[in-house]
Image (spheres, rainbow, N blue to C red):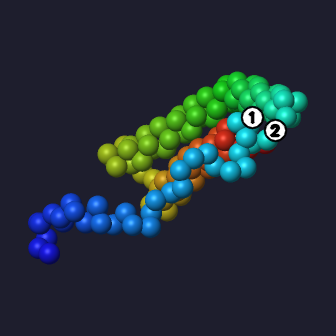
Amino acid sequence: MPKNELPDPSIVDESDEGLSAPRGKPSGVSPRGLGLTDAEMRDEFERILGESEINREKARLLVPFSWAVFGFACVYCVAIFAVVFADGLGWVEVDRIALRILAGSITISAVSIILTILIGLFRSR
């Protein structure tokens, strides 16, 4: 078949042999939530609701910390950028090894701070 030619749609009609699923309700599944009793369903609902409350409270407590860490990372990156920029314009003389260390420290700091925040926010239990 050439590259730009579309396949014949009749092959779809011919290909459905052996792919039909049995009709009707799946066996062994109760409409009451997979066979759970009312008490078990209430207990599970309360457990999930409790976890939800804990996660909301945890997120609420982490918001100020997250903003403080994010602010520090931004100020740190701007300060390092100012040093590198001033060196590039010749206003200050910074050794090349020191510039490499500064650039590496920005990368390491930013990545580790972001990962710490993400792990804290999305860690399960």
> What label does residue 36 carry, if any?
2
The vertical placement of 2 against 31, above or below, is below
Q: Is residue 29 left or right of residue 2?
A: right
* Residue for point 47% across, 37% down: 78
Q: Position of residue 66 (x, y in %)?
A: 64, 32
Residue 40 occupies quadrant: top right
- Which element carries disc 1, helix, strand or loop? loop
Q: Is residue 92 left or right of residue 14?
A: right
* Residue for point 61% across, 45% down: 25
Instruction: Identify which residue, 125 or 85, lies in the foreground.
Output: 125
* Residue for point 66% across, 27% down: 63
CB atoms at circles 2 and 1 under 8 Å apart?
yes
- Indicate the amino acid at tag 2: Leu
Can you identify the residue that label 1 sits on? 32
Mark 2 neighbour density, 10 Å: few (under 14) some (14–19) many (20 or more): few
Residue at the bottom extreme?
1
The vertical placement of 28 against 3, above or below, is above
Q: Position of residue 82 (x, y in %)?
A: 43, 40
Q: How many marks can you see?
A: 2
> What label does residue 53 carry, if any?
none
CA gap between label 2 and label 1 equals 7 Å
Q: Is residue 92 visible?
A: no
Rendered-image quadrant of the C terminus:
top right
- Indicate the amino acid at tag 1: Arg
Q: Position of residue 119 (x, y in %)?
A: 67, 45
Q: Is residue 62 visible?
A: yes
Q: Position of residue 14 (x, y in %)?
A: 30, 66
